[in-house]
Image (tube, rainbow, N blue to C red):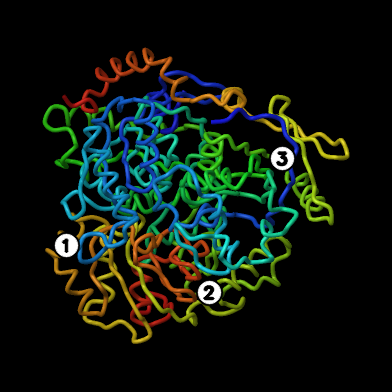
Amino acid sequence: MKNFETFSGVVAPLDRANVDTDAILPKQYMKLISKYGYGDYLFDNWRYEDEGQPGDDCSLRPLAKDFVLNKASFRSAQILLCRDNFGCGSSREHAPWALRDFGIKVLISSSFAEIFQGNCLKNGLLPVVLAKSRVDQLFDLAEAELPLTLTVDLLGQRVVSPDGEVDIFEIDAFRKKCLLEGLDEISVALEHANDVRAYELRRRLSEPWLFPE
Amino acid sequence: MPKTLLHKLWNAHTVREGPAGSAVLYIDRHLVNEVTSPQAFEGLSVAGRRPWRGDTVIATSDHNVPTRELEMGIRDPLARTQVQTLERNCETFGLKQYRLGEHGQGILHVTGPELGATLPGMTIVCGDSHTSTHGAFAALAFGIGTSEIEQVLATQCLLVSRMATMNIQIEGTLPWRVTAKDLALFIIRKIGTAGATGYAIEFSGSTVRGMSMEARMTLCNMAIEAGARVGLIGVDETTLTYLHGRSYAPKGEAWDAACLYWRGLRSDEGAIFDKTLRLDAREITAQVSWGTSPQMTCDVTGQIPDPLDEPDMSIRQAMVHALKYMGLQGGTQIQAVELDKIFIGSCTNARLEDLRAAARIVEGRKISKRIRQALVVPGSQAVKAMAEAEGLDKVFSDAGFEWREPGCSMCLGMNEDRLLPGERCASTSNRNFEGRQGQGGRTHLVSPVTAAAAALAGHFVDPRTL
């Protein structure tokens, strides 16, 4: 995982509530066994006019011209502005992989589904939760004629608008550290291997049937 | 101080406290499927790690497997590679697996409990959001992503944020031909698909106590559709009776000791929940979803709501969008909606009890000529064998259904069982998202009873009238 650095990026507004992970990455691409290469298939059913299959050359497929990420100003968007309950449904981590591979670094919404939110953090994607009223305002700004650019500063836990308005967001200290330093969580966890062994010894006594020889 | 079931399970599995109320939890059971695991095994291999406790893993292919002509193998080369990759990974790392066609193979959320691999007091994870199903056994069970699969394989632990607690207390007996599925859809309709985000839902009350384990699993399975990663039901005699004698369940003295411990796995009298919702089961009727989110649901006797009656503009917009996708109009009686396909299956509703309930409706009758395809996909090889021993396969075949091999099948349409664009399906699965059962396909979520009734009529019908 790459270190998360402060950046300024274009905001693409996706004005739909309850966007599910089936929509973010349709099932046929879950047949692939790689962790990378899903960017062309992001929002496949909404982004293209035809039904895609893994391995298709997506540059030859007909685009749905009204879809937000197909508009010239949003093709290189790094921030996706979303509505309530974004990422609901299936636990597929392929959804954050597709967002990451497309080039999205930050998602802003009034709420995210839990499993999806966790999956994002494991892949260097930052989900930012802001108040619903503020998300509404950002939609108005992002849908205006000129694309909206926001600066996201994870260290300071803030999103800065061009007019200087600052939105502070919350993130737990451990997740923040992992993102900032691009840490491998498993290595961090294995530093506490002795705690796990001690726990297993206690548990063997209290619930021995869970440790069949 | 009285404790909730969640708190008991949480405390029993805390290896170490984490930041902001989170904890590193120890994982007792890890169910592994072919679709969400390959990248996790690859990560493990690349880092040169071994599974911490391989004996906690049970693996099988369910999402991507064909449901007929198993002897022909898997024709789709990508699906075949994925299934073979799981088989190879299990061999490499010495993990227990059930191969295609083998007794023990099926949808993991059906086979886990059936094998007794799901036990009260466990933490259970799987790279699948419907892992909430196992909470019916008072297990803390939740879906995880692929990175977390790798982490559990490598460390047997996960850093988890503490959920808030929601008690959904349901009293009374569900009316005739109204099932746990209808209750689940009714709850989601009431609280919304994000209504329980951040919560673990505990289902309680006399309705739940009166339910079979199969019905309880259906209820907990759908907790995720209300946004809750975890569904829970306390242990009672029904739980213990179900588990007794199953392959992985403890035997002899160990069984007695386990039961003693398990009986305490329920919320204490007077335990305080962050939120409580009370429902009267007698007021619930058969439910049918009409839109593209499980919360877009109405009574089988009701109408599809008219967006013009909705004051909130963003909800109205979502309704308009959903109705357009579904090819429906607000104000229509749901019973006037005609169907093309019927799907009875999935981790929500493919257990023996579900198949029996549907079979009782169709026995001695024929499905409507309108219906192009009606599938029954048992949840596991064991369910299939038991159903066949009772002659249910014959009941379904005689009525015009296709009797298939177990798997996730048309619930998510990863294999060849799917809807074509514009096709409308009464489905016993759990999600009616756009394209879920096939691009352009239109899904209506219902119980097995309602799906069977709809198959006979060719449109939705109140199962009480049959």
Q: Is residue A204 shown left or right of residue A133?
A: left
Front: mark 1 or 3: 1
Q: Position of residue B382 (x, y in %)?
A: 18, 54
Nearer-the-camera pick, B235 or B247: B247
Residue displayed at 44% across by 35% down: B147
- Disc marking residue B207: none
Above/below status of B394 relative to B217: below
Q: Which residue is mark 2?
A: B302
Instruction: Please tell me whether mark 2 sits on a helix, a strand or a loop.
Output: loop
Chain letter for mark 1: B
Nearer-the-camera pick, B459 or A134: A134
Residue displayed at 63% across by 44% down: A104
Nearer-the-camera pick, B462 or B437: B437
Q: Which residue is mark 1?
A: B71
For mark 1, does the 10 Å Cα neighbourhood hold few (<14), some (14 to 19), or many (20 or more) residues?
A: few
State which quarter of the image contains the C terminus of chain B.
bottom left
Q: Which residue is mark 3?
A: A130
Above/below status of B197 relative to B1: below
